[in-house]
Image (cartoon, helix red, strand yellow):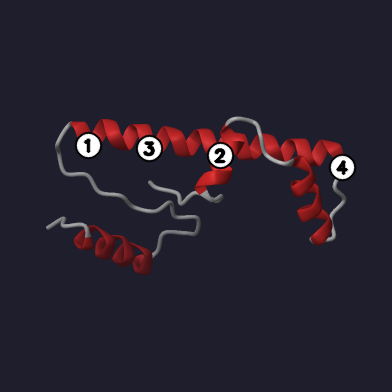
Amino acid sequence: MVREPLLPMESLDRAARGELDRAEIARGLKAAALDATDDLVGALALEAADHAARVELEERERDALAALERPTYELPTLTDAVDLAALYDLGALLAAQGMV
């Protein structure tokens, strides 16, 4: 169950270190016509740090699995209901990764 990172790698690194530019976050909120309160900006910075930690964890786990030298396959997280079309899509992804 893989999720694509929501931020570019440089931003993920800064988020993990707690060094995101809060003024930039506030500008983005204002550009989206949202009230850029200190609480909201802080909450978004913490959310980005949590996301960065999750991405780092996934990378470490990927490395640990690769060290086992066993076949592994990655499928995306499904956010909608799993219907027949979704199962076919997952099957196509597995086949593209070499699963037979």
What's the distance in space between the residues labelled 4 and 3, CA to CA? 33 Å
Mark 1 and mark 2 residues within 8 Å of each other at the beta carbon: no
Q: Are discs 1 and 3 less than 8 Å apart at CB? A: no
- Name the mark on residue 51: 2
Q: Which residue is drawn at the image coordinates 54% and 38% (left, top)?
A: 13
Sequence-wise first label, 2 or 4: 4
Q: What amino acid type is highlighted by mark number 4?
A: Thr
SS at circle 1: helix
Q: Which residue is mark 4?
A: 37
Coordinates of residue 4 in the picture (x, y in percent): 46, 52
Q: Nearer the viewer, residue 15 or 98?
A: 15
Report the Cα–Cα distance between label 1 and label 2: 23 Å
> Counting residues from the N terminus, which is met first, the one under dot 4 or under dot 3?
4
Q: Going from the N terminus, do you reach mark 4 or mark 1 first?
A: 4
Q: Which residue is mark 1?
A: 66
Amino acid identity at mark 3: Glu
CA neighbours of label 3 inside 10 A, class few (<14), some (14 to 19), many (20+): few
Q: Quadrant of the C terminus?
A: bottom left
Say which mark, if any, is on residue 59: 3
Mark 1 crowdedness (10 Å alpha carbons): few <14, some 14-19, many ≥20: few
Number of labels in the image equals 4
Tag 4 near tag 1, CB within 8 Å: no
